[in-house]
Image (cartoon, grey):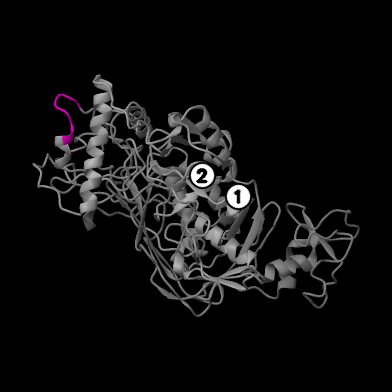
Amino acid sequence: MSRPGHGGLMPVNGLGFPPQNVARVVVWEWLSEHSRWRPYTATVCHHIENVLKEDARGSVVLGQVDAQLVPYIIDLQSMHQFRQDTGTMRPVRRNFYDPSSAPGKGIVWEWENDGGAWTAYDMDICITIQNAYEKQHPWLDLSSLGFCYLIYFNSMSQMNRQTRRRRRLRRRLDLAYPLTVGSIPKSQSWPVGASSGHPCSCQQCLLVNSTRAASNAILASQRRKTPPAPPLPPPPPPGGPQGALAVRPSATFAGAALWAAPATGPAEPAPAPGAPQRSPSAPGGAPTPGQNNLNRPGPQRATSVSARASIPPGVPALPVKNLNGTGPVHPALAGMTGILLCAAGLPVCLTRAPKPILHPPPVSKSDVKPVPGVPGVCRKTKKKHLKKSKNPEDVVRRYMQKVKNPPDEDCTICMERLVTASGYEGVLRHKGVRPELVGRLGRCGHMYHLLCLVAMYSNGNKDGSLQCPTCKAIYGEKTGTQPPGKMEFHLIPHSLPGFPDTQTIRIVYDIPTGIQGPEHPNPGKKFTARGFPRHCYLPNNEKGRKVLRLLITAWERRLIFTIGTSNTTGESDTVVWNEIHHKTEFGSNLTGHGYPDASYLDNVLAELTAQGVSEAVAKA
């Protein structure tokens, strides 16, 4: 048995740097919504280090080396990652590890998520796994790192100790992380301006010094854990408690002064680049501590009136107003403005981020009307509401034509040549299906071994439909594994943003908790249903009503939801959305799940078509 440890982390000094003249591996990391430090890839870290050598006060455009990170910029002055299209900011840090550890060797450990993609472990976990692997331990317990998982090296799998569910893991060789040796030049130390010299008496230095003094006073107050003196509360922000000012790593600037009142708690942050997740089934939804985004990447900031005494008289604060997303200026400009002000050492006034408007104003029952052209107001699905097919061989033969002389190319299911026997020979036997038989799908024309298609169908939902693994064309009526529930829909007398003269279609989904059936991941085990009833919104126009009719069809085919692992919380065996996006935000679009969104209706029609739900199919 092996117990985890942090053996690869280098000791650091007060500025976050290791001792001088010691070789160390540099890993840049960002703070996730689960308060976990997630590593950038080695390629991105090399890029950041190269920019750092040229300009320690500059910014790093991550999209130059990773196409998935195009919206993101790292500001080296404030040590924050900035997303240009939303204005979201997240703390980053420059961490150091032993050159003999996993990042120094370019070794990455990853686990397979429900979608079949591979996700890298946090760097400390990766190093722990690699240490146990090198010592030839048969297994590793991650419980002391806060994760209820066991790693089995003989089967290269990860097991949840509570649910007993297993996932594959892999060890991958990649580019080694950058290595640095020797002392850090004075110009590359940060927080920028943290020298021991005395600043001059110019206005710029006074501003920088006042900001740092105020931050130090706040941090000292936090360490003493003494409550701040009661301030004179300013007017409260809309919808917020009296005298409260929430600070989070998101750069939304407006209104009240930075030193106005104590923070009551951070707001929940927005997603980070590429949405890397905490390890599987990790609890989520925890608020991320607010970070000092002025001159240091230090611990949480809680503003206090005691900091007022640290600001020299006559030194003005520079609030950035009217950038809460409701004014004419995009929040991304607010974030960039904050970066520029921080880089200049100017105080920046932070305020509570705007809250999404999830629901419409109250509606009386008499104002709720049926949707024109859509019969009824409710649809229910029951358990095992599936048309089970005959045997798999009959289903496959229904959609395929026999090919007498197949071409000499690969079968993309078993990866054997079509002119040879199926790779499932000896693994799967069906009477009347010889392993060398090849068939062509009727509409798309792609060819496979019949035995391979029988195997693929047998491992799926077995609902009488078949989906081409190459082009995703659907043959028959595809159904899903959605648990039993109820779908309601009606008209309300309110308009969505972007549709000022149009009423709104409200859809209400309600699924209770229950027991998983044979078509689900863990038959016989209880599943949870978080956040129900869920309210979704469509404009009451021709295209909106078309989407509603197709969503009703998708609901009846059990395609809207499924049971799996939540991308938001990491919880397994819970009801999750099933690749058909819905708008759950009524009066805003702060989360990306609201209006205005000019392309949403077309996008959801395309998603429904990909699930085999379209008007052409419905009329056929």
- Tag 2 residue: 603
The amino acid type, in three-letter code, at marker 1 is Gly
How many marks overall?
2
Q: Magenta segment range?
A: 310-316
The amino acid type, in three-letter code, at marker 2 is Asn
Residue 418 lies, in percent from the top left, at 85, 59
Q: Residue at x 43, y 54 (%)?
A: 36
Q: How many residues crowd around disc 2 within 10 Å: few (fewer than 14), some, or many (20 or more)?
A: few
Q: Answer above or below: position of 1 versus 601.
A: below
Q: What's the magenta bit mostly, secondary-structure-wise?
A: loop
> Rounded to the nearest whole Å, what is the CA distance between mark 1 and mark 2?
43 Å
Residue 371 lies, in percent from the top left, at 36, 52
State yes or no: discs 1 and 2 in contact (Cβ < 8 Å): no
Q: Which residue is at the front of the view, 543 or 416?
A: 416
Residue pushed farthest top? 202
Q: Is residue 532 visible?
A: yes
Q: Is residue 387 visible?
A: no
Q: Of the numbered discs in the image, which one, if any, rests on residue 104?
A: 1
Q: Residue at x 43, y 46 (%)?
A: 544
Q: Answer above or below: position of 31 versus 411.
A: above
Q: Of the numbered discs in the image, which one, if any, rests on residue 263?
A: none
Instruction: Examine the image and state in which quarter residue 165 appears.
Output: bottom right
Residue 435 lies, in percent from the top left, at 84, 69
Residue 324 lies, in percent from the top left, at 28, 36
In front: mark 1 or mark 2? Answer: 1
Q: Secondary structure at mark 1?
A: helix
Q: Secondary structure at mark 2?
A: helix
Q: Answer above or below: position of 317 versus 579.
A: above
On screen, residue 230 versus residue 436, left or right, reads: left
